[in-house]
Image: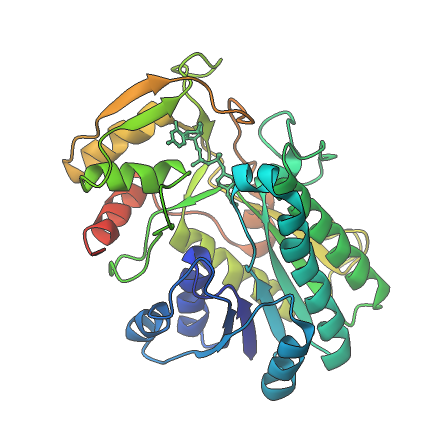
Amino acid sequence: MKVLVTGGLGFIGSHTCVSLMESGYDVVIADDLSNSSADVQERIAKIAGKTPAFYKADVTDQAAMERLFSAEKPEAIIHFAGFKSVPESVENPLKYYANNVGSTLVLCALMKRFGTRFIIFSSSATVYGDNEIPYREDMEPCRATNPYGRTKAMSEEIIRDFAASEGGRHKAALLRYFNPVGAHESGLLGEDPRGVPGNLMPYIQRVAAGKLPCLTVYGTDYPTVDGTGVRDYIHVMDLAQAHVAALRKLEAEQPAAGAGRGDSESTYIYNIGTGRGTSVLEMIQAFERATGVHIEYKAGPRRAGDLPEYYACADLAEKELGWKAKRSVEDMCRDAWNWQKNIK
Ligand code: WQD
């Protein structure tokens, strides 16, 4: 089966392409290179033993995407392409709605036009907003706390309504990621954001590499185990493998009524997390244990918009997809450092 992976040269997309290809799928990548580099295509090929097709394309460009669908006729889509900086989405919400929601609308229209049966959407735990923890798929989400999270929530609704309107011709899985970190064990793929990283792990990686002097811990007075923020970090390869499990689910069976969490039998929703929380200080200690590298840090004020603590209830993905995260926080730190050492 041919799978179109939008944003397939990005951090999560590239790791998912490897898992898909190792599971026997043909992969076609569409990526506008706004937050990725073209050499990732060859790195994927080195690991998977085959070069995936690549189209430099803006997924909101309907004409360009129509040419791709006409040439490749994908049977499934995994939609990663999207902007993902929370602070930037607050500064420039229209850019986020145009890109993140616009791309979803284009893909659904082309799925209908070309008969693409499946879509898996890269959603995020931010759609839950300030809800009780652990987050469960059947919760009524609160309003997401930023425009980035709202673009994910809106894309979920668009996909659910589209799939429900099509009488089962199309099936969808919405995967709500928690905090993806780490890298492929080969050290050939990993996270390398442009500029100064906003997220914790890439920042720690750069401190370890001596590219940044010191990590600022955003808030040490939260009502958590040690006063610092707690998140559900998941190894990017566990996350990649969850996409293969979700695709197999969509392929395998007509869902029994009520099997999914969607509006009808055509959409499934899953938390993709470990079900365990790790604090910032615990992450720093895990990184030092796993790598032997000291991480200099200092306490700083809370970051606007941060929630104190959230993590997944990950039972549904285990029950319905047969998928469970296997890698530990130390594995995440070890692989992230192994990748960081390879970055020039
Ligand atoms: C984690 C913890 C910070 C940086 C965001 C998006 C989410 C997803 C992942 C896209 C928090 C603390 C961080 C630093 C710190 N992105 N921290 N110093 O905010 O949980 O989630 O990225 O899908 O949608 O919301 O991730 O890594 O930024 O922060 O102390 O320099 O680390 O306060 O407690 P976050 P993060």
Q: Position of residue 19 (x, y in %)?
A: 42, 66
Q: Position of residue 296 (x, y in %)?
A: 21, 26
Left or right? Give the position of 242 relative to 172. Answer: left
Q: Vertical placement of 1 versus 273: above or below?
A: below
Work out which residue is located at the far bottom of the displayed protein and give it.
71
Residue at image location 29% in from the left, 29% down from the top: 215
**What kind of colouring is applied to the model shown?**
rainbow
Left or right? Give the position of 272 relative to 265. Answer: left
Left or right? Give the position of 167 relative to 157. Answer: right
Q: Vertical placement of 175 versus 233: above or below?
A: below
Quarter assignment of residue 105: bottom right
Q: Quadrant of the C terminus?
A: bottom left
Residue at image location 33% in from the left, 25% down from the top: 216
Q: Quadrant of the N terminus?
A: bottom right
Q: Quadrant of ligand 1?
A: top left
* Along the viewing direction, whichever of 214 and 226 lies nearer the viewer: 214
Q: Vertical placement of 84 versus 305: above or below?
A: below
> In this figure, what is the number of numbered marks?
0
Q: Position of residue 180 (x, y in %)?
A: 44, 46
Quarter assignment of residue 201: top left
Q: Position of residue 326 (x, y in %)?
A: 38, 47
Work out which residue is located at the far left of the displayed protein and give it.
292
Left or right? Give the position of 149 relative to 181. Answer: right
